[in-house]
Structure formats: structure tokens, C-alpha cells
Image (cartoon, rainbow, N blue to C red):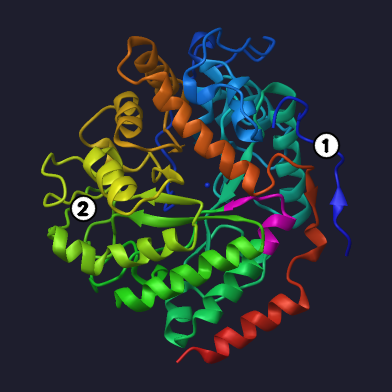
Amino acid sequence: MPRISHGVVMIAALLATGCSSGIGAASSAPSPRASAVSPVASPPSPSPSLSPSARPSGSLAERTLAAMSLRDKVAQLFTIVVWGQKAGAASKENEARYGVATPAQVVEKFRPGGVILFDWAGNVSGASQVAALTTGLREAAARSGEAPLLIGVDQENGLVSRLKSLVTKFPGASEIGETGRTANARDVARATGEELRDLGISLDFAPVADVNINPRNPVIGPRAYGSDPGKVAAMVGAAVDGFHAAGVASVAKHFPGHGDTSVDSHTGLPVITHSKTQWRKLDAPPFRAAIAHDVDAIMSAHVVMPKLDPSGDPATLSHRILTGLLREELGFDGVISTDALDMAGVRKKYGDAEVAVRAVLAGADMLLMPPNLPKAYDAVLGAVKSGRISERRIDESVLRILRLKDKRGVFGPIRTDPGALRSAAHRKVAERVFAAVR
């Protein structure tokens, strides 16, 4: 079936999702002053003085950054949840959290960098419905701001499958790992990515790069490719290649490794006692492989590794881990995403406003699912205005996010093809891999 073009090209003349499996505690309705942008205001003018990294250049991402106000740059860091099946349909949950009723109004008001879809948020009921929702959200972003909207989902396959019966049923990571063939990881990721693209989804919060070495692990388990670091690394690299072949961004998770825990970071704060030598041997290889295969983003874990950072902060808030290890030792210069900020593992020590600020200071670019967006947004904006976070630091994160969007075609026309899902070719891939499971 040919792709259906919705005829919307992202405003382009000058311009150029976790784990995340739980619902955050409901926040009180935000006041109009707490919003990033008034829903009725015209787009703000660009900042009169731009930091050097934001000055116009030849790339689409840099030109877009140069045209953005500070408020819009801060908003670009956030990837949020919206409630409802239709971009224009009202939801009481949106009203309570954001002060506006429809998903489209949320996007127009706050201008977030991304939206992550969930079945529990009412976003998923049918293929045509999801395609219409993603189209409507991206059209809302095109009407209201400089940057296009990135739409992501947690579609790991197996245990974590947000799109359920809408897409082809593929084996989960542990089953793919059991086949011993990296080609299976690549083929499943490619077919998954093609179906996401047909729904208007440009980023998958997959693959899981954790090495599941703890049999009591309550949160990773079969979501990992296995317990051997070398074999997991090979599978992760192949999966990244598969997503890229489909034109979809991939996110390796959960750095620096969530495989040796007996506590679920959704409900508590796991502590892993690996030494740096053990970490390099057991946890790091799959992330090294993902980076070698040019993974678009890496997600942090809400875990404490006291021998990597004695502060007691989870990795999501650790400069030593996100910047020292991931950026400097492993050489990663793509997008660092937090795991969901509504999870208990990251909320134990600091309030929701401070968590967002500390994540940026640690090195995170994408702030995923803050439980109170207005509070988190105001905290980061206030930290920039006070000098606690430099505008140059914000520019670095936004530029990474915009480059990802450019690389994966998010600036381009909005096209979906929901009728192409569960094709015969994809079903054959699933059948072949399921048959190869040992």
C-alpha cells in the first residue's frame, strides 16, 4: 500500500518515548504563569544575544537552534505524556496536569521536544487512530514553534510492547538472544522500526543494553538479550543497525547498567556494587557496541553505583557517570535521555523541580516524563537565568536533539501508512525467529 502523505511540511524556510512504564503521581493544575508558552501568545522572538554554539551555521539543526528563544530551548529538553486518542479530543487528565484539554493544545502551549505514547494514557487503540494522533501532534508543533516534534514509544517487543496487537508480534530480546544469531536482532529491529515509521513514530526506546546477570532482577529479566556481555553487545549493535535501516532512532538503555539489581527502580532505588573494573567488563560492552554502531540516544538508569560515584545519587543525576563515563570515557556525543522522571528511583532524594535541574547538570539532554512539567520547566529555566546552568549548556543539549530529528527525518513531510502494518514479510521474520529459539 502506498504511503499516505498528510501534506504537512515542517516549517522549514529558515528552520531547518523506558523503562517509563508507570504513571507518575497526578500533579495539581498548573497556573498560566507556569507554562512554557501561553497557548494564545505568538511565538517569542529569538534571544537578542545567542551563545556561540547557537550562532547560525550551515546545518538545519544549527539554524533552527539560532531561531529559538531561551524559553523554547528549555522546552525542547522535555519529552512528555499526553492523554487521549485524538489530537483534538479533550481529556480531564490533560486539564489537571497542563491546564488545557487536548493533546494538540498541550503541544501548542508547552512546545515540548517530544511526546511518548502509551496505551495506559489512551494513546493506542488502532493503527489508523495512532497515525492520526501522531499526525495531529506534529501539525500542532508545526503551528506553534521552531522545531518539529519527536514522537517516541517503548516498543521493545516481548514483555514491553506498548503497541500490542497493532503491530507484528515479534520475539522479545531474551528469545532473540537464545537464537544466537545477530541477524535476528537486526531483522526484528528493522521490521519493528518500519512499522513504527508507518504509524508516524520516529524513535523507539529500545534496545535494552543491560546484561541480566542477576536472576532475581525484577525489572530487566527477559527484556535483556542475555547474561553474557559479549553476546549482548553483539545483539545490541545489530539491533541498532536494524532500527537505522528502518529510518527510526534507537535508544540503548539503561546506562551504566541495570542488569545486576534485585530492586525495581520504578518503586525503589537499586544499589549496584560493581567496581569500575567490573563495570567495564560486565556492564559497559553493550553500550560500547551501541556507540560504535552510532546509536542515536542512550537512556540513563535510576541506579546507584557507589564505586563509580560515591555521592549516593542515581546515575541519572550523576555528572561522574553521565559526563565522566558516558561522554568522556566511552566517547558518546549523541542524546542522553533520562529514564522516566516519575519513577521512585530518581525521586527519593530531591524534589521534582530539583531533579530536572540536576539531570541537566549531570549531562542529560532529554528529560523524560517529568511528573509535573510546569514545575520542572520553571526550575530549569530559572537555573539558566540564575547562571546555575549556562545557556551554552542548554544549547549543547538542544543541538543534539535537533540533529537527531534532522537525521531521522522529523523535519520532513508527515507521512504515515497504517495499512502496511503486519505485512507478510514482517510475519515471516517473526515466524523465522520464533522457530529458531532454542
Q: Secondary structure at mark 1?
A: loop
Residue 44 image label = none
Residue 270 image label = 2
Q: Is residue 187 left or right of residue 304?
A: right
Residue 8 image label = 1
Foreground: disc 1 or disc 2? 1
Q: Is residue 398 visible?
A: yes
Q: Secondary structure at mark 2?
A: loop
The residue shown at (23%, 71%) is 214
The residue shown at (38%, 71%) is 233
The residue shown at (61%, 28%) is 57
Residue 201 counted in the magenta span: yes
Residue 338 counted in the magenta span: no
Q: Which region shows up in magenta? A: 194-203
Earlier sequence position, callout 1 versus callout 2: 1
Say above or below: 138 vs 100: below
Q: Camera-side residue: 170 or 47?
A: 47
How far apart, in angstroms, are the residues tagged by discs 1 and 2?
45 Å
Image quadrant for the N terminus?
Answer: bottom right
The amino acid on which the numbered mark 2 sits, given as a three-letter code, is Pro
Which x, y percent locates residue 153?
56, 51
Image quadrant for the C terminus?
Answer: bottom left
